Amino acid sequence: MSRKITEESLQNFYLRKKFNKSNMSVEITDEGFPLLKLHGNTIAGKDYEGYWITDAGWPTRTTFERLNGFDNVRVNTKKGQVYLNGEEWDGKKVYIN
């Protein structure tokens, strides 16, 4: 179950609409692609290759909760190791298409 702020952020992200509420924002690049930001750090985006996510160097519960709002994304930790969809993940940019 995702938080309302996550749902609102992702809705605007997919609609490519600017958004700013609490610690979340959606910015639109000059090319018209959306960027999802948490505390000003870009944690997701879209480009010519597709949708992508990153923990932006902040592997926190809040970051993971926001990323888990995406379909087909499951980020969790087990014994200090971060996992993305069951595979070890270093938090770096990965496409989720």
Image (tube, rainbow, N blue to C red):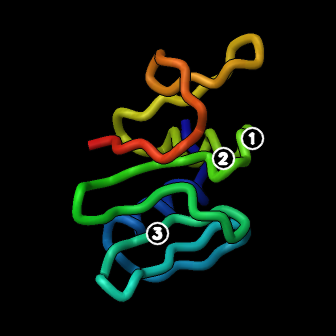
State if disc 2 and disc 1 touch (CB < 8 Å).
Answer: yes
Alpha carbon distance from label 3 to label 2: 14 Å
Q: Secondary structure at mark 2?
A: helix
| Residue at position x 69%, y 19% in the image | 81
Quarter of the rendering containing residue 97? top left
Identity of the amino acid at label 1?
Answer: Thr
| Residue at position x 73%, y 47% in the image | 58
**Label number found at residue 60:** 1
Label 2: which residue? 63
Looking at the image, is mark 1 or mark 3 earlier in the sequence?
A: 3
Identity of the amino acid at label 3?
Answer: Leu
Identity of the amino acid at label 2?
Answer: Thr
Quarter of the rendering containing residue 22? bottom right
Question: x, y (%) of residue 90?
Answer: 59, 32
**Label number found at residue 35:** 3
| Residue at position x 33%, y 53% in the image | 51
Q: Is residue 30 above or below residue 50?
A: below
**Label number found at residue 21:** none
In-front residue for pair 6/28: 28
The quadrant in which the N terminus is found is top right
| Residue at position x 36%, y 88% in the image | 30
Q: Secondary structure at mark 3?
A: strand
